[in-house]
Image (cartoon, coloured by chain):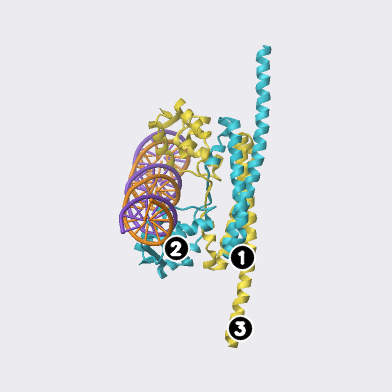
Chain colours: A yellow, B cyan, C purple, D orange
DNA sequence: CACCTAATATATACTTTCTATATATATAAA
DNA sequence: TTTATATATATAGAAAGTATATATTAGGTG
């Protein structure tokens, strides 16, 4: 899939690997991250398959070694369009080390769980601020990028609401547990 | 991370590989999927590291070859607890072939895009029905699993709302484009 | 009873994605 | 001149995900 993301970006303008990462971080950094280890091997493959062409460029005035500037070829545009109009093969995949833990919080220390949830709330509230600030900026990039940015904000808001709700439920549960435990204690002492 | 997911499941009860997949599909199938190619190598590794123990069992009355029943060891429980109380290392990762395409819909056929969006709406409306039906069932599995199920429903609802909103925006944009194109046509004809 | 099908169960090869790190160059500053 | 920093490419290796091969047994069918 990264292959097509790169082809899509080269649809906008010619770029070299380093610039591609920069671009993704600036535009989708809050939803999508990528590494050089994903970019360079993909560029190599795309080049070998004739989907992109390459020119080495001496950087004029700017830092660093020679850049490899890539352009999308006709063949590349054709394959990209074919992919774009395909039905998406696989459903959405959500992977989150926090949610993975959350499922099992029943096995651990409840107060520690609440602590981690509080950290998540803080993190996502900061994210939300940043996203709202950027929303206007994305408006200039056309409606599709703008709508994706809106989705990011919606997701962020929904998640914060859920986190706060969950915290309340867990706190209720903890106090419920404690009273149950105390009753057991009483019974033991009584017995 | 799958390593810890497996340790977590073995916290509930002893299981063999096939059962682990079944369990994940039944409980988190709508949010999380896993393959045997992820399960068996992980079980092997966990066993070699002494985090789980194994007994081969002749299936009594039931189909299939001998099962390898795994249990979590003391060492395994310790490592699991350490992980559980750790701060989540990485942020949420959302990967979706549909959203990946969506970003680039400006480069393709708009009517085809709307068609794909309609399919997504149908798919997620079916998902939502299924999830709402299951919500009560998850209640019995304890508050953490229930809250995760609620998150799934919330995410689903939010996404449908966003898809419908996006469709409207795109349709407005298409009719805007067409009128612009017609004006250009008129101008050409006029000129 | 021999044969076939379906469900159960494990295993492994392979691809893609992700992380970590090595390497090189040019600018700017000390 | 040396050093630090930003730019830029590259690759090894780990983790996750896909595809497929293989074996066993219950149960049905001829």
Image mark 2: chain = B
Q: Which residue is mark 3?
A: A186
Question: Which element type, helix, strand or loop, lies under badge 2?
Answer: helix
Q: Position of residue C27 (x, y in %)?
A: 45, 34
Q: Which residue is mark 1?
A: A170
Question: Which element type, helix, strand or loop, lies under badge 1?
Answer: helix
Q: Position of residue A70 (x, y in %)?
A: 44, 30
C-alpha distance separating marks 3 and 1:
24 Å
Q: Are marks 3 and 1 in contact (CB under 8 Å)?
A: no
C-alpha distance separating marks 1 and 2:
23 Å
C-alpha distance separating marks 2 and 3:
35 Å
Question: Which element type, helix, strand or loop, lies under badge 3?
Answer: helix
Query: Which of these two is toward me, A159 or C16?
Result: C16
Image mark 1: chain = A
Q: Position of residue B145 (x, y in %)?
A: 56, 61
Q: Which residue is mark 2?
A: B7
């Amino acid at each position: 899939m990264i292959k097509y993301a790169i082809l899509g970006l080269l649809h906008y303008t010619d770029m070299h690997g380093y610039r591609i990462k920069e671009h993704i971080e600036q535009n989708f950094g809050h939803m999508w991250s990528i590494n050089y280890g994903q970019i360079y091997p993909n560029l190599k493959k795309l080049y070998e398959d004739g989907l992109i062409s390459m020119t080495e460029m001496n950087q004029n005035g700017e830092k660093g070694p020679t850049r490899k500037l890539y352009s999308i070829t006709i063949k590349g545009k054709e394959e990209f369009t074919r992919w774009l109009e395909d039905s998406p093969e696989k459903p959405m995949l959500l992977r989150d080390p926090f949610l993975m833990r959350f499922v099992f919080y029943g096995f651990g220390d409840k107060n520690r769980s609440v602590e981690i949830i509080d950290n998540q709330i803080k993190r996502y509230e900061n994210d939300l601020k940043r996203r709202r600030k950027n929303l206007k900026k994305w408006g200039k990039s056309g409606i599709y990028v703008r709508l994706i940015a809106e989705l990011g904000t919606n997701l962020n808001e929904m998640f914060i609401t859920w986190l706060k709700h969950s915290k309340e439920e867990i706190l209720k549960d903890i106090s419920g547990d404690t009273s149950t435990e105390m009753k057991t204690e009483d019974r033991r002492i009584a017995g």
